[in-house]
């Protein structure tokens, strides 16, 4: 906890001794929060893995998984990777000494747009499930699965639980990012203090990584078995 | 007469401290001072403790006779379910961390506050939001599944499972936020010179507890989400009739809930280490072993959940592995007990109330722990599973252990929290009542369970009655033992003798500031040059006995 030359920054909270300590606390806090997120998604992933290894259910999973549109999934994966890049650039320009506020805000706005794009595409996918009665519940039907019909429902439950939780994280992320953009517009950040941008960057990358796992597990596993979607 | 006392008090304490720094409801509800938040928690948690206690007394009244005469089987199911839920999620899990931990961690670290004071306040609101859903579920008719929510019953039950699940889900976030805050605070806010191995064992225990909170609670959260989805949409993940797997629920549930019992007992062990050191005036024997045993318990606790599932269609091989692994969890707990005993050996022991609770804790914890080993033995567990033996076992650990430590800690730090002493005579009496009442309530339950009385039944065979009557009698004594402290604590806030900064005297940093502490804890940040538990030779009590009217 070396004394920092910016010990009396206006963003220093009353209970910290210096900016360095405050920064350390913030980023450790964020990492621990992400750890809890891993455990949170981990529980649902566990359920997926268990069923994936249960003989009959596993077969039903392949059938159900092949109704997903791999192309849309792939596009969304690309969209999210781009948004990670724009967010990383926004963090970079928040750190640099030069007058880079414009660039920083631009990249954050791009991130918001990419995030919204993802959600819109996801919306189309959900709508497709709706028209095919693949939403779990009373109206559910999947006659093509024959005796496995009830088990394909397990796949869709896990699909909606995981992608739904993921989408929820994205929505929360976009709202927070809008707040941060407002703060940036009010010139609240400087190379000495831009913790919210940096910490939010970590969160956004995490949400992207979750999708990187979801995409192959939900869309691709079993894909080769039947030679493609639909 | 009262005026005279007040005048006298004004002379004694003209200074400002965290309690009188500002006034009014708003100054409390919007406070970000960890000490005030601890007191907010104390208020909420006390309400739930007595609510859970009321349910317990109803259970015991029903079991006074072999016939189900004061309530229907359905009402009884709801009674023990709500007793379990309230006690576990709204009392035991938050009690020591959120009240004592919140109050003491920054003080013990020489910090001005926790790392994230606003998140700390948020966690209290989250707790209460969860509590509102839970109370709603209780008022709207209750839940009949048992606190474990086993599927398929919890999927099919027509009772208020959904709002209850929402309440517990929300409440979990308050637990996660507290754990996160503690870990970051311990890492980044220690005073200069306060190295890891100079930390009080109370801090180590809370560090380990926080690890469990952040790793385990999210798994419970997602399990509850899945359960909720299943109930609302009528789909099958855990529901066997729709192709799902009910045992999967038990795996996910116990992955959290076995470690969760350590969320309840580890902070208690931290408290006991402080009490044992302070009242035998010795350094804790094998300090680093005690510190690491907390971490070992936290990590290891995640590997033994399957011992709750010996009879739920888990393979015999898995049962054997979990049985074998479970024995190892006993080692770090035993390390602690041995080290406490070694510390007591040749210490200059004083029999103040907190020490009485500490002794009670050790005795009861040994019984609870040893019977845990019985239960971890695969063959034996099949015999006593779901009998009163199990009920007695976990009450010895959770009530005999955690609640004793909580009360002991409350007495020990009360002068720091309020600047006042409690009445020693009454406190000793209530410690005695708690100890006697507890044993009379729960020891007969070991015998009942061993003879085969099943748990969660509201009627029983006639020959079990004698032991049940003993248990109910014990419960009434225990109830008195719990109500007394609440009365004299409240009394002492106004009339108790004034306590000096370090009345016992203790060795931690929390005793190096005035009582009650100022809002920012220390006049100036302390620099630590000594190890934990280095006691001065001066043994004298340091509180003024300012009696009312004197
Ligand atoms: C006043 C003294 C108490 C009495 C007389 C009492 C009584 C009981 C009884 C009879 C049961 C078993 C119901 C059944 O399975 O049929 C039970 C369960 C339970 N009690 Fe207590 N209890 C007391 C205090 C506490 C306290 C202080 C806690 C926690 C701090 C607690 C936590 C639990 C839990 C977690 C269960 C398990 C519920 C379940 O698995 O269904 N009890 N209690
Ligand atoms: Cu266990």
Image: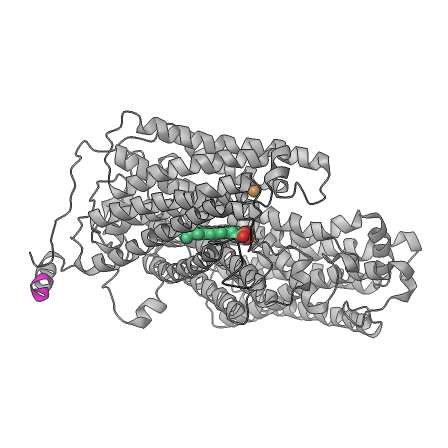
Q: Over which residues does the magenta segment extend?
A: B1-5
Q: Within the magenta stretch, is there residue A92? A: no
Residue B26: x and y, percent? 32, 72
Name the residue at 70% across, 62% down: A161
Q: Residue furthest top?
A: B346
Q: Position of residue B43 (x, y in %)?
A: 36, 62
Place of residue A142 in the rendered image (x, y in percent of width and height, measured from the top left): 87, 66
> What residue appears at the point 55 percent right and 34 percent down from the top-left corner?
B374
Q: Is residue B4 above or below residue A17?
A: below
Q: Is residue A86 left or right of residue A2?
A: right
| In the displayed structure image, the side of residue B504 where residue A147 appears, left or right | right
Q: Is residue B154 left or right of residue B177?
A: right
**Quadrant assignment for the C terminus of chain B:** bottom left
> What is the quadrant of the N terminus of chain B in the image?
bottom left
Closest to the observer: B116 or B510? B510
Q: Is residue B225 visible?
A: yes
**Does any portion of residue B206 appear in the rendered image?**
no
* Residue B504 vertical position relative to residue B219 in the rendered view, above or below: above
x, y percentage for residue B183?
Answer: 46, 48
Characterize the magenta stretch by its predominant secondary structure.
helix
Q: Quadrant of residue B535?
A: top left
């Amino acid at each position: 906890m070396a004394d920092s030359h910016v010990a009396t920054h206006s963003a220093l909270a009353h209970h910290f001794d210096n900016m360095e300590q405050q920064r350390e606390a913030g980023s450790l806090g964020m990492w621990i929060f992400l750890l809890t997120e891993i455990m949170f998604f981990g529980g649902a992933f566990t359920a997926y893995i268990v069923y994936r290894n249960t003989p009959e259910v596993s077969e039903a999973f392949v059938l159900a998984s092949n109704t997903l549109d791999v192309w849309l999934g792939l596009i969304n994966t690309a969209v999210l990777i781009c948004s990670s890049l724009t967010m990383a650039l926004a963090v970079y320009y928040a750190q640099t000494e030069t007058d880079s506020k414009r660039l920083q805000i631009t990249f954050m706005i791009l991130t918001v747009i990419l995030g919204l794009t993802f959600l819109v595409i996801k919306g189309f996918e959900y709508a497709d499930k709706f028209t095919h009665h693949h939403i779990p519940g009373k109206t559910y039907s999947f006659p093509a699965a024959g005796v496995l019909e009830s088990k394909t429902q397990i796949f869709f439950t896990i699909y909606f639980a995981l992608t739904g939780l993921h989408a929820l994280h994205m929505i929360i992320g976009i709202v927070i990012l809008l707040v941060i953009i407002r703060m940036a517009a009010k010139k609240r950040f400087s190379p000495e203090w831009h913790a919210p941008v940096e910490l939010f960057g970590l969160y956004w990358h995490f949400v992207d990584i979750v999708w990187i796992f979801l995409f192959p597990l939900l869309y691709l596993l079993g894909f080769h078995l039947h030679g493609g979607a639909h | 007469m009262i005026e005279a006392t007040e005048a006298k008090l004004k002379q004694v304490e003209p200074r400002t401290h965290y309690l009188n720094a500002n006034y009014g409801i708003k100054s409390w509800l919007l406070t970000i001072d960890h000490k005030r938040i601890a007191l907010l928690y104390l208020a909420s948690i006390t309400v739930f403790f007595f609510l859970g206690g009321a349910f317990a007394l109803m259970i015991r009244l029903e079991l006074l006779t072999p016939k189900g005469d004061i309530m229907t089987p359905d009402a009884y199911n709801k009674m023990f379910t709500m007793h379990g839920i309230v006690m576990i999620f709204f009392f035991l899990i938050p009690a020591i961390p959120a009240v004592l931990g919140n109050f003491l961690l920054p003080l013990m670290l020489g910090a001005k506050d926790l790392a994230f004071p606003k998140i700390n306040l948020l966690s209290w609101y989250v707790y209460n939001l969860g509590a509102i859903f839970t109370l709603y579920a209780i008022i709207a008719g209750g839940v009949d599944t048992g606190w474990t929510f086993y599927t398929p019953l919890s999927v099919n039950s027509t009772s208020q499972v959904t709002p209850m699940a929402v309440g517990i889900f929300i409440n979990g976030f308050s637990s996660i936020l507290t754990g996160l805050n503690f870990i970051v605070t311990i890492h980044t806010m220690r005073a200069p010179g306060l190295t890891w191995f100079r930390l009080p064992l109370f801090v180590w225990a809370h560090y380990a507890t926080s690890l469990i909170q952040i790793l385990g609670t999210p798994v419970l959260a997602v399990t509850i989400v899945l359960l909720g989805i299943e109930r609302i949409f009528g789909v099958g993940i855990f529901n066997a009739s729709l192709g799902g797997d009910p045992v999967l629920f038990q795996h996910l549930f116990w992955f959290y809930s076995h470690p969760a019992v350590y969320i309840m007992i580890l902070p208690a062990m931290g408290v006991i280490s402080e009490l044992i050191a302070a009242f035998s005036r010795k350094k804790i024997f094998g300090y680093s072993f005690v510190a690491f045993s907390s971490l070992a318990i936290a990590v290891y606790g995640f590997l033994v959940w399957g011992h709750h599932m010996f009879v739920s269609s888990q393979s015999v091989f898995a049962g054997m592995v979990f049985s074998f692994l479970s024995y190892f969890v006993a080692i770090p707990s035993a390390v602690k007990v041995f080290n406490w005993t070694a510390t007591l050996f040749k210490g200059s022991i004083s029999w103040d109330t907190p020490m009485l609770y500490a002794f009670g804790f050790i005795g009861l914890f040994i019984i609870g722990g040893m019977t845990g080993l019985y239960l971890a033995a695969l063959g034996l567990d099949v015999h006593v599973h779901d009998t009163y033996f199990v009920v007695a076992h976990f009450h010895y650990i959770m009530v005999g252990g955690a609640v004793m430590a909580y009360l002991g800690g409350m007495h020990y730090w009360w002068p720091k929290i309020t600047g006042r002493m409690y009445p020693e005579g009454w406190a000793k009496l209530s410690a005695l009542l708690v100890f006697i009442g507890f044993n009379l309530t729960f020891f007969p339950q070991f015998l009942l369970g061993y003879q085969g009385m099943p748990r969660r039944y509201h009627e029983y065979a006639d020959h079990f009655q004698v032991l049940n009557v003993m248990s109910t009698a014990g419960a009434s004594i225990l109830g008195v033992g719990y109500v007394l402290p609440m009365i004299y604590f409240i009394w002492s806030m106004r009339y108790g003798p004034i306590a000096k900064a370090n009345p016992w005297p203790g060795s931690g940093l929390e005793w190096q500031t005035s009582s009650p502490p100022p809002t920012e804890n220390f006049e100036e940040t302390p620099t630590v040059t000594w190890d934990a538990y280095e006691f001065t030779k001066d043994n004298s009590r340091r509180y003024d006995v300012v009696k009312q009217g004197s």
